[in-house]
Image: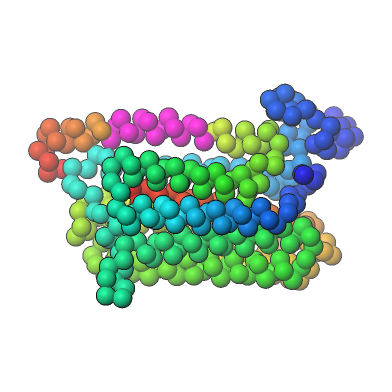
Amino acid sequence: MTTAEGQQHPLGIYFKIWGLLFVLSTMSYLVDVLDFQGYLRWTLILIFMLLKAGLIVSVFMHMMWERLAIVYAILVPTLALMVLLSLMAIEGNYTEFTRFLYFGGGG
Amino acid sequence: MTQADVTQHASPAERPDGLQGVVADWASDQRAFKGVPWGKAMMWIFLLSDTFIFSSFLISYMTVRMSTTVPWPFPSEVFALHLFGTDVPLILIAIMTFILISSSGTMVLAVNFGYRSNRKLTTLMLVVTALLGASFVGMQAFEWTKLILEGVRPWGNPFGAPQFGSTFFMITGFHGAHVSIGVLFLLIVARKVWRGDYDDGRRGFFTSRKGSYGTVEIMGLYWHFVDLVWVFIFALFYLW
């Protein structure tokens, strides 16, 4: 499917993904309208978010047609962010704990 | 390395796929990204760096939201609009989301028509994308005005935790700036396409190099990235 330079694909797949993104956005909006709370809400939000992100990157940005050399070069470094995310989650929890401990909820 | 090496191995078909292909492509003394023009590779690397900037913003937002002992303002109510006699939650944000997705759709059509050398349709789609992007920025300006009039400031707000304002203005402002720059970028590319720069090989103003319809695809990568960032902001800031 790939030509040497440039990405040329049938239009149909773009319209399908476009529609799918609309459906997924509506569903994530409905999570708020229907007022789901707690773990159900967070799980649904994350699932819809990751599905939309995946569709945009793989089809609209043509990642699924690129060679693995560039796919890995772009996508693997983002995993480093997971480390930052976990460190800051620990940090955030600890800061909240110390604020409750020393400021009694006033921080 | 001879010139022949570059050109002979540039065609992706002759090379192994999978992990073996990654090793072969990354091996020394050759072009690593087969079938990817240098401009596109550079745009991807820029977008990777932008990913780190936006992720740092979103992670710092997570950190302050986790660590504050004051209740976080309820986004569903803060961003509600009073329409037809009721408060509709997040309606403006939902409309902005659909507009940005649609602009991504028209962008991808522009890329496709570009590679078919359909000058008129490419220009049309680029202009439509720019208009959708501009309307997105307009709605964001409306939203900012509304919140500022309600007393939301970077250092405090009437709804709850003071960190809400700073993270909100920081994250949506940085994203809005990206959209605005994207609109300019789109209009510049649209003008070049309309003038036929990519058909008659006119040399660029800054680069003095001949452009090609690949430029539209590179422009598209930037625009889709803006949409991609909004997906994360919508989920993590507005819906969470």
**Colour scheme of the rendered structure:** rainbow
In the figure, residue B102 lies in which quadrant? bottom right
Q: In terms of image quadrants, where is residue A15? A: bottom right
Task: Give the main secondary structure, helix, strand or loop, of the magenta stretch.
Answer: helix
Question: Does the image show residue B188?
Answer: no
The residue positioned 24% from the left and 31% from the top of the image is A94
Position of residue B189 in the picture relative to residue B92 (left or right): right
Left or right of A62: which side holds B73?
A: left
Residue B212: % across, % down: 77, 57
Q: Which quarter of the figure is the N terminus of chain A placed in?
A: top right
Q: Which residues are magenta?
A: A78-92
The structure residue drawn at horizontal position 58% and vertical position 67%, both measured from the top left corner, is B130
In percent of width and height, residue A96 lies at 21, 36
* B154, above or below A107, in the image: below
Q: Position of residue B234 (x, y in %)?
A: 41, 53
B16 displayed left or right of B108: right
Point 9% across, 38% down: residue: A104
Comparing A34 with A95, the one in front is A34
Residue A9 appears in the rendering: yes
Q: Quadrant of residue A71?
A: top right
Magenta stretch: residue B107 in it? no
**Picture coordinates of residue B182 (x, y %)?**
56, 60
Direction right: furthest residue? B4
Towards the viewer: B207 or A23 = A23
**Residue furthest toward the bottom?**
B84
Between B20 and A13, which is closer to the camera in this rendering? A13
